[in-house]
Amino acid sequence: MEDIEKDRRYEYCERLSQDHSKALHDVYRQTHLKTLAPRMVSGQLQGRLLSFLVHIFKPLHILEIGTFSGYATLCLAEGLPENGKITSIEVNDEFEYLIRKHLENCPNKKNIELKFGSALDVIPTLESEFDLVFIDAKKLDYPLYYDLVFDKVSSGGVIIFDNVLWSNKVLDLDEHKDPRTQTLHELNLRIKNDSRVENFILPLRDGLQIVRKI
């Protein structure tokens, strides 16, 4: 019964929150039609949150780790200042055609730089300072991403990790001893105890760890 109520709450919030654009609706639909794991795409509410945060903070340079089909990229681009830039890293170059097609109608597409390869290899080559980092990639590498990007994040900048509740498996660590669940829990605990940041976990969708560098 509780899960049913949660689903109803989510549906209510989604219905009475701002809808995503037609372009985003098309990306969402094409992701479900043309990829094997469409559940990886950010949904409407999470997409609206990302767009909302960019509109509020107006970050000049955003780093996205894990482009997938480009849905979250387009959401981040909605609030991007004219002189802003998004650097988005995707390990799977098979998605390149789909991503570039989805970015065709983005007004800020000239401000989006795509890089293909392992984020662990790409991040050390980036010389920019980032005001916002959105991470939705290989879960086992989340702690490494945190270490690699931290010194590249501006003071007051924000780092967002997706999927930190991992289908609620982090709630039952004795039952779920798989490496991804344990890694995500350890990262959540580490961030909670990191004196260099302020953080909170938002139980939206599969959980967002939102970190502000002090």
Image (cartoon, helix red, strand yellow):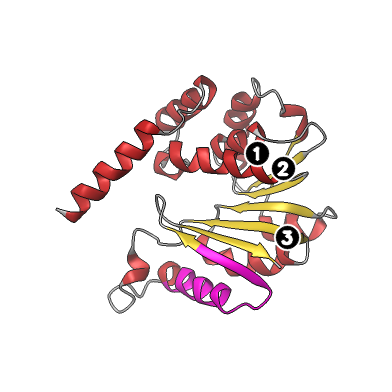
Is residue 43 rendered to the left or right of residue 126? left
- What residue does disc 2 label? 58
Percent of width and height locating residue 191: 57, 73
In which image quadrant can residue 206 be found? bottom left
| Residue 102 vs residue 4, the one in the foreground | 4
In which image quadrant can residue 158 be found? bottom right
Q: What amino acid does circle 1 point to? A: His
> Do the numbered discs 2 and 3 sit on residues whose CB atoms are within 8 Å?
no
Q: Residue at x 26, y 45 (%)?
A: 7
Against 151, residue 158 (above or below) is: above
Against 12, residue 90 (above or below) is: below
Q: Residue at x 65, y 62 (%)?
A: 212
SS at badge 2: loop
Q: Residue furthest right?
A: 127
- What residue does disc 3 label? 156
Is residue 50 rendered to the left or right of residue 77? left
Q: Considering only order in the chain, which callout, 3 or 2, is on the residue closer to the N terminus?
A: 2
Give, as a single range, the part of the protein colored magenta: 182-200
Mark carried by residue 36: none
- What residue does disc 1 label? 55
